[in-house]
Amino acid sequence: MHKLLLSAVAAALGLALAAAPAAAQTPEKIKQRGVLVVGTKPDYKPFGFRDPSGAIVGFEPDIARLVADKLGVKLELEPVVSSNRMQFLQQGKIDLMIATMNDKPDRRQIVGIIEPLYYASGVNVLANKKANLKSWEQLKDQKVCAIQGAWYNKPVAEKYGADIVAFKGQTEAEVALQQGNCIGWVYDDTAFAERLADPKWSGFEMTLPTILEEPWGLAVPLPERDGPWGKFMAQQLEDWHRTGKLIELEKKWNIPASAFLKKMHEQYSKKGS
Amino acid sequence: MTLVVIDLHPLWDWFRVLNESTGIKLTIFYDAFDRARFFNSFLTSVRLMGICLVASVVIGVVGAWIQGSKLRVLRLFTQGYIQFFRNTPPLVQLYFFYFALGSYLKITGANGIAVPLVSNFTWAAICLSFYAGAFNVEIFRAGIEAVPRETLEAAESLGYSRLKAYAYVILPLAFRISLPALNNNLVNLIKTTTIAYAIAVPEMLYVANQIWSDESNVPEMMNVLLIVYVALVGLLVWVMGRWERALTIPGYSPA
């Protein structure tokens, strides 16, 4: 009886649950097609943002270009957001996803996260100076701006009792914070460094200790993870860490030097020699 | 006296078993945090719908009455209101009110930070009520115009003032004629409340979006949303249908 009920519910949900099989991808197939489609973020300065001409540029598009150049194909950047990027990969709309995604066990069941990982960031709060924020506990029952779909919205709400007010994109969260709709904005610490240098944000500060530090992974469709395409990307990542290519890109985009990249560079340059 | 406590744990746990055996991940049942936030979002949605339904009908009735006013200024004002709210997308209105207008209406809150006077929920309620209200004015106007002029003349000859004739003779008849169209618009209003997620009102779509981002259970949450909205719209349609039948005048409109 138990089984029967389960299968009835399974059948009811089955229609929507049937995942579309992603087309098998190999470096050869991409070369034949002549185009590499990479999902990147258009609203995460300086990791991925639109320049005045509308093109997506930044740290991650540069990584995507490294891959396209290696394959000798044209690069096509597909803008994605946190809440749809994994589906884009599952549906085969993109070959590769480099979209500031943290490496999480449940995400590994959906997309093929490639090791070694390429970056790491933590969570912090850009707060109004007048809020005088000194500890995470002060966020209890306070309105805190956030981005819809960010994985740390739940732990911050659960652990510190913050009242998360999440918006679609960075611009909305920014405006909401500046208008006083929330006392602070909880987000990746890497995204705040550049803002704090801007006089527009002089009334704001980042005083809390960074929490929930997590590495970022780029991903290929799950069935490709251990196939030729996944292995090709893993090899690229090792090369970039060994040669210090990623540290170079970090400098190019004025991102504060991360301890993670330094550590990876040391680790892989030792391996290489 | 014995207090009856229904222990829902076995039921909640059944969904955990469902996940483990089939991969259908309905955390809104077995995860206490997700359950609480989804239930709260349901209440928020229902509250928003309730407020907007009532307010938009009131706006429709009052607006239609003002439209027939002898004062040109009042008529022009109503016309302007209808054109503004009917002819712009509700999402654009929400953004306009919350981000543009909201930035001027401020008070000083705790810590001396200037905080908005009007909350995002209130803006959503205001905006959606006026949006649906604009359509309701036109719907009621159509109903009023369908009432034979002779009926109004008969009411006036019996000594009814304009307001009284509107309230006791025209509106009850016009209302019956308007009901099918009103029904349509209110169903639409219920569905449109989902756009409040754009200004971070924690209604169902907003919370479902956050849950499927946290738990990677997009298809499950999409199904849950679909079922809940079908149920809510179904309930409204059923109530409106009952009301329509209850208001039928034998011989005036087909039953």
Image: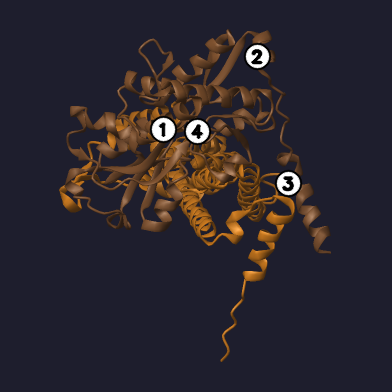
The residue wearing badge 2 is A30
Q: Alpha-carbon neighbours of circle 2 within 10 Å: few (<14), some, or many (≥20)?
A: some
Whole-angstrom CA distance, mark 2 to mark 1, is 31 Å
The local secondary structure at tag 1 comes to loop
Whole-angstrom CA distance, mark 4 to mark 2, is 23 Å
The local secondary structure at tag 4 comes to loop
B192 over B249 or under it: above or below: above
**Chain of the residue displaying label 1:** A
In screen coordinates, is A192 left or right of A270?
left
The residue wearing badge 1 is A169
* Same subunit: marks 2 and 3: yes
Task: Evaluate whether residue A232 shows in this view.
Answer: yes
| Chain appearing in brown on the rendered image | A
The residue wearing badge 4 is A117
Foreground pick, B27 / B67:
B27
Whole-angstrom CA distance, mark 2 to mark 3, is 34 Å
Q: Position of residue A273 (x, y in %)?
A: 48, 24
The residue wearing badge 3 is A13
Evaluate if marks 1 and 3 touch, with contact meaning CB atoms under 8 Å apart.
no
Q: Chain B rendered in what hue?
A: orange
Evaluate if marks 2 and 3 touch, with contact meaning CB atoms under 8 Å apart.
no
B191 over B246 or under it: above or below: above
